Amino acid sequence: MVTLNTLKSQLVKQLLFFTFSAALLLSCEPQESTNTNTERFYRSGWNVEVHREHAAVGQIPAANEDYSTTCTLYKDGQFTINENSLNDHMYQYWGYSWSTDQFFMNWEQCVNWHINEAEDSMYLQYNHYDYDPNTGNSFYWLYEMEMTR
């Protein structure tokens, strides 16, 4: 037979268990919003000064090129530089990792980058893989981009 004291004891234990569980779960809730606004990258196009270069590779002479144009970053990771003479380099890919605070271009971590939110500008320096089918040589272009709005 269950006594009144046994019922009270069980009720107190259950109440303590639920109170402890609720406190534990609530302590895991973030205190600040973690919804980071990435719209600053793709809300509108950018004016961009592009400098790219590579050393001589086999029969391919060294290159040192500058372009002044515009570019667009899209929410889905596409990156279009509006300069036809870049050929397939017009179409690249961007990404940003909030957890590691790293900017990526074409699935590789940028060599150097910074964002100036106050001036709405961004600087990207990264390597971009290329292959010359005429010579069979692979090499990297070093890109530097000064982006402003």
Image: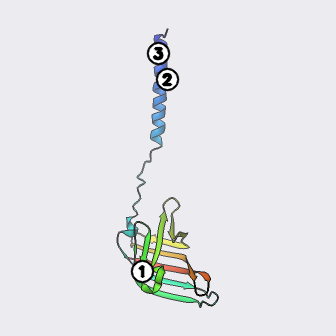
Mark 3 element type? helix
Question: Residue 7's mark?
Answer: 3
Residue 132 position, x and y percent, is 57, 84
Pointer 2 residue: 13
Q: Which label was assigned to residue 118?
A: none
Crowdedness near tag 3: few (<14), some (14–19) or many (≥20) residues, C-alpha within 10 Å: few
Give the residue type that dot 1 points to: Val
**Disc 2 element:** helix
Can you say whether 59 is above or below 98 in the image? below
Residue at 44% from the left image edge and 82% from the top image edge = 49
Q: Amino acid at mark 2?
A: Lys
In terms of sequence position, does the residue under pointer 1 or pointer 3 come before the other? 3
The C terminus: image quadrant: bottom left
Separation of disc 1 and disc 3 at Cα?
74 Å
Q: How many residues crowd around disc 1 within 10 Å: few (fewer than 14), some, or many (20 or more)?
A: many
Q: Position of residue 28 (x, y in %)?
A: 48, 43
Residue that sits furthest to the front in the current view: 134
